[in-house]
Structures are given as C-alpha cells and as structure tokens.
Image (cartoon, rainbow, N blue to C red):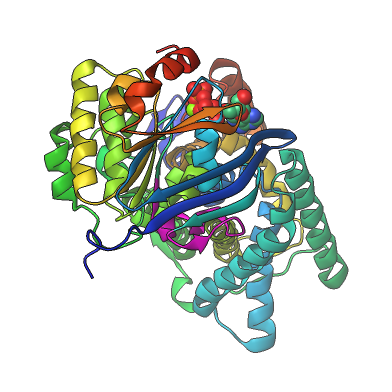
Amino acid sequence: MTLFDIPTAALLGQLMLGLINGAFYALLSLGLAIIFGLLKVINFAHGAQYMLGAFVALLLSRHFGIDYWAALILVPVLVGLSGCLLERFLLRPIANQNHLYSLLLTFGLALIMQNLFTNLYGSSGNAYPTPEVFRGAVNLGFMHLPLYRAWVIVAALAVCLAAWFVIEKTRLGAYLRAGTENPQLMQGFGINIPFLITLTYGFGAALAAFAGVLAAPLYSVSPTMGANLLIVVFAVVVIGGMGSIVGAVVTGLAMGLIEGLTKVIYPQAATTVIFAVMVMVLLLKPNGLFGKGA
Amino acid sequence: MSELHATPIEQLRLDNVHAFYGESHILHGIDMKVNRGELVTLLGRNGAGRSTILKSIMGMVGRRTGSIMVNGRETTRLPAFRIPRLGAGYCPEERGIFASLDVEENLLLPPTVRSGGMSLDEIYAMFPNLYERRRSQGTRLSGGEQQMLAMGRILRTGANLLLLDEITEGLAPVIVQKLAEVLVKLKERGLTIILVEQNFRFAAPLADRHYLIEHGRIAEEISAAELPGKMDLLHRQLGV
Ligand SMILES: Nc1ncnc2c1ncn2[C@@H]1O[C@H](COP(=O)(O)OP(=O)(O)OP(=O)(O)O)[C@@H](O)[C@H]1O
Ligand SMILES: [Mg+2]
C-alpha cells in the first residue's frame, strides 16, 4: 500500500523515529519552558546539562559499575543539585540585571562544560550499553522497533505527563504558575520565591539530565551532543511559545513527527523543516502557538 | 486571656519609615500605630504614598528604613516572604488575581500563616458568587468578583492584620455595600484592618481612625470622634 507514492511502512517507520526525536525535544523544551517561565532565564546551559546527564551516566557505569536503572534516578538528582548550586551562586546574584546577563552566563558555562569534557574525554563519541532487558526489537508490522526506542518514548511521555500533572494539578504547581505570573505578590503571601526559583532551575536541569541518560544508549555520548540538539530545541520552544508548559511538550512531539514526515517526503529538508516552521510561526503568531498575548 | 478585654495590643507600629523605589524617595518619615481590632484608613490624593505605605509594610518597595513592627516583630530586615507569616495579609490595588489559576486555586493559594482563619465554606458563604464560579479562570471574573476573590484569599490564611488597597475602586454601589458589610464582620472577628480608600463615604462610617497622607508624610491623624469637625479640612485636601 502506498500514500502519495510513499510506502506506508516507510512512512510509519519515519514517523516512529520522529516520535523518538520528538520525545527528546519535548523533555528538553519542557525544562526550558519551566525555567524561562519563573526565572525569565533563557537557559543556554540546557544542552550541556543534557550532555552532562549522558556523561555522568557513562562515567558512573565505567568507574563505579552503576547500571542504567540506578543512573536514571541518580544522575538527574546529581545534575539537578548542580543546577540548584548554579542558580543559587551564579544566577541569583545577577537576577536583577538585564536578562542578557543570565543568557550569556549560561552560554559561557555551556561552552566551559563542553570544552572541559572534550579535553578530558576527546570529541569522539562513547558507546553506552543498552540495558539487558531492552536488547531486541518488537515487530510492529510496518517496522522492527528496537525495544529501547519504545522505552524511550514511554519514559519520556510518562515524565512529561507527570510534570504536567505536578504543574497543573498540585499546590506546588499552583505556586509555580502563580510565581511565574507575579513573584512579588507570591512573596506577599509568604511563599519563599528565591527557594522556589532554585528548585525550579534544579528541576529543569534534572529533566535535561534525565533526557541525557535516556539518550546515552541511543546516540553516542559526546561532549557536543547537547549543543547540536539545543539549537533545534530552542526552535521548538519558540514555536510553542516561551513559558508554555503544555505548548512545549505538544510542540516537541509534533516537531519530531514533522521532521520524520519530511524525511520521507523530501529528505533534503528534514534538518531545516523545524526552522522553516519557526519562521512561519514567528511571522504569523509571534508569541508562539501556545503563547499568551503580547 | 481574652484579647478583647486586655489592654490594647499593638498590632502594627511604624517609626520614622522612609521608603524608596530606586532613586525616588517616596515616604518621608511615617510614624503610625495600630492596635489589634482597629480599622484605620489611609486617605490622600493620588500619588500621596498610601499604597507605598502598605507595600513598605509588606517589604515590596525597593528599600525602606526606620522601624516596622508587625505583631511585635521588627520586619525591616526580614525577607519579604517572612512578613506574611507574622500575620499580615495584603490585598493589592491591582487585585493580583492569577490568570493561570481558577477561582478556587486562587482562594487556596496563600498558605495558612496562623490558626483561626476562615474555612473555604465560610468564605463561599460570605461570597456566594465565588462558589458559583469556582472553576472559572480567575481573571474571567467581573471586577467586583475579582475583588471578593482578592479579599477572600487572605481571609483563609488566618492573617490578623489586613492591608486593603482601594478595594472599592471602580465597583458598583451594591458591591461596595457588600464589601462594607464584610468589613464590619471582619472587625467583629477582631481583625485589624488598614484601608486605603478614595471613597470617603465608604470608609468614614467603618473606621476608628484616619490618617491623612500628603507627599509621603502623615499630614493629620483624625479619630472617628473628631471627624465631623475636620470635614472642611478633608474636603479641601481630598476634594471629596
Ligand atoms: N514602582 C514605582 N517606582 C517608582 N515610583 C513609584 C512606584 N510606585 C509608585 N511610585 C511613586 O510613588 C508615589 C506614591 O505612589 P503610591 O502608589 O503610594 O500613591 P497612592 O497614594 O497609592 O496613590 P494612587 O494609588 O491613588 O495613585 C507616586 O509619586 C508614584 O509615582
Ligand atoms: Mg495607591
């Protein structure tokens, strides 16, 4: 069976791969959106934190024999804590300055981390073993989907869903939403906003690290893995609308799918299609698809 | 240990308070004392600095000097988020209803700071409109409903010092009447209230004392008993 002369199997296969990329876009843009919402910081270190997640998992496995499952919990906690420290001691002192300062600071930190890891471990990729249970593939009829990839989709979606639930349905989430709107008034109600900011940045960094651990067995672990991805993720965030949580997740998944679709229809454009969408969205709806008013 | 029969308890005291927004010096030495259970108004023309007094108490100005005691605790060196925990509840001039929260989430948002606050049911009984619209987005409410929400929100927390900034501004007479009834009830509950008001006819019958604010200073302190004799002065100063 074909659709526009494209074999359905190939189409579905590419869509599935697109969904996997989309899962990473969603996880990363979710973290960026949460951080931007409360801190108004465009976190250029996000890609480095993703890379850090993958690297720390690799190093923990190499030197301490810590396996994938433990890393999946431990690494986000470690990177999240480092994010809290970064916020507390580097971002907070410049919080009242022009937002450009925090952008430059996080950008500089990203470069430092990236170059540090390049110096220590070289620029070539390192393989991270796929966990035992996920070796093999499942036959979906139109493609053989490696089990690990299926797991990535499930895990990423579950985390996005959990984050959505926490943000939209819990008291902590209400603090986050209200703090995003009017932090000063929240302090006037007795909410410790500086602490909430530190936690939020740490949580965003932890999400990036979680994505990094998920990515480790899939892509090779290299110092530049985050930098390459971050550019696309920024485009996703711009399309979805800065600061919109749901927008970030939905747009992330959708952009992955669009990329997959383009790979089938016109492969040459696959790497640029997201930027083309971004330009169109910026022209038609400058606040992004899910962004609120000006 | 009934508080009603004890000697007056000093709920709020400002000594030589100066406040600044960046370089602009707005308050020039405010001295003020409010006892528990009193309802006091801050009167003055636009820009006199009445909102700034409330914001200074809440730690929401750029910088403040002097002494501000809330429930017996010095607050000028506390971070802003500690002040509400001493029992201060703030209702800002712009109401500050959160668009990303529904009505009930807005109501439940401020954490409890003391025991003795009103329950959600009591607040809904006081403001039935809010109950009917509890699932609506906070900012979809009418101006009057938003004002009720902004008030109800701080009644739940147990705050015993309420700072209310122009709560009647732009509201229909029936709603203003409703708010007056609410203030009477709150006073009966023993709450201390500082009311910034333009609507003098609303404030006059409720208040124990009035402070007239001019250019960031207290120009006059008028008790309810002295009010009739001072009406000319107020007319001149406020244009009411
Ligand atoms: N954030 C701010 N930055 C700089 N100046 C401010 C700020 N807020 C208020 N002011 C100035 O402080 C002065 C007092 O303002 P305030 O809001 O306290 O007045 P007000 O008595 O509440 O009057 P009204 O609310 O009727 O305008 C005004 O001159 C105002 O311009
Ligand atoms: Mg005012």
**Position of the N terminus of chain A by quadrant:** top left
Locate residue B129, reporting x and y percent.
16, 31
Q: Residue furthest bottom?
A: A64
Residue A75, by quadrant, is: bottom right
Comparing B191 with A137, the one in front is B191
Residue closer to the observer: B200 or A45 = B200
Q: Nearer the viewer, residue B85 or A272?
A: B85
Q: Quadrant of the C terminus of chain A?
A: top right
A120 shown above or below A8: below
What x and y, as percent, mark residue A15? 47, 41
Which residue is depicted at the point 59% across and 54% down? B67
Vertical position of residue A149 compared to residue A272: above or below = below
Place of residue A18 in the rendered image (x, y in percent of width and height, measured from the top left): 51, 44
Residue A47 located within the stretch drawn in magenta: no
Q: Is residue B228 left or right of residue A156?
A: left
* Numbered label tally: 0
Q: Which residues are magenta?
A: B71-89
Q: Say left or right for A137 vs B122.
A: right
Left or right, B226 with respect to A95, comes to: left
Residue at 78% x, 56% y is: A109
Q: Position of residue A94 (x, y in %)?
A: 74, 50
Who is closer to the viewer here, A23 or B227? B227
View quadrant of ligand 1: top right
Q: Is residue B226 visible?
A: yes
